[in-house]
Amino acid sequence: MFEKKIFTTSEAKRISEAKILNVNNPEYTDTYSPYSHRMVKEATESALRELGFFTQEKLYSCSNDGANVVSLWRLNSERVLGNVCIAWRNSLNKFWSVGYCEALMDDFYKRVISFGKFANIRRHTGQLTDEGLHHLVKLTVHKSLDKIDSLVAWHNELAEIEFDEPTAERLVALAMRENALLPKNFKDFEQSFFTNPIFNLRAFHNDLIHLIKDDHLQRLMEYSIKITRFIEKVRPIAHK
């Protein structure tokens, strides 16, 4: 269905909205009617407006053939730790369902610091209507944004977990062992994290995420999940 590469790897990493909206939809069948990227984008905008939000910034990544899109929108609502975001994804080749998750950006650098878990809307079917999609999107976006407070609270808890330099060095070794910190990124991480006057688990988490801040959004989300799992695993060690 989608075999031709229409975007280079560099283009796909940070693609413009205009190019995303120009990707052609495949022909509908009796059992498969994919939502176009335009439909999902417009349904998301409409749902956010009804919920009292508007977008301040939009980032997009896609597959080389344009079939699979991941988007991160920074919204107008701010919390103590950073900026509230909504992430969504869509597929024209059955790779995944339309899905949404909450995310946070930091205040100063406007870099993503954490993603929640995707809530998926049902897979594409032959029973497709704009109204039905809008209703499902609004419900899912509302649920995702309701989880922001929990995400902020989790980050605040990490900031309270402080540790000494020997523990920091142990955490680095563990992160590399579990591929939460890749060897190629070690020097950049060392220069960033070890200049902090006080070591805490939130800074450790954020510096790991920031190492790939400019990467493909799908990789960034997958990496965020891996980092979150790692941080939860080493909390008892850092807490001592």
Image (cartoon, rainbow, N blue to C red):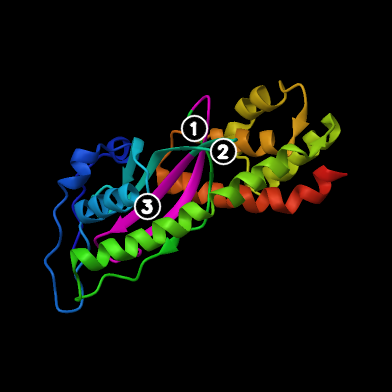
**Corner quadrant of residue 56:** top left
- Name which residue type carries label 2: Ile
- Name which residue type carries label 1: Arg
- Name which residue type carries label 3: Trp
**Residue at numbered disc 3:** 88
Instruction: Say whether marks 1 and 2 touch (CB < 8 Å).
Output: yes
User: Residue, x 30% and y 41% (percent of image)?
Assistant: 12
Point out the stretch of residues depicted in magenta. Answer: 84-109
Residue 83 in view, yes or no: yes
Instruction: Give the label, 3 or 2, closer to the camera.
Output: 3
Q: Earlier in the sequence, mark 3 or mark 2?
A: 3
Instruction: Say whether marks 3 and 1 touch (CB < 8 Å).
Output: no
Residue 98 in view, yes or no: no
Is residue 84 placed above or below 139 in the rendered structure?
above
Q: What whole-number distance in Å separates the C-alpha atoms at marks 3 and 1?
A: 17 Å
Q: Main secondary structure of the magenta part?
A: strand
Residue closer to the observer: 142 or 4: 142
Circle number at residue 111: 1
Is residue 35 placed above or below 184 in the rendered structure?
below
User: Residue, x 19% and y 63% (percent of image)?
Assistant: 130
**Residue at numbered disc 2:** 209
Q: Earlier in the sequence, mark 3 or mark 1?
A: 3
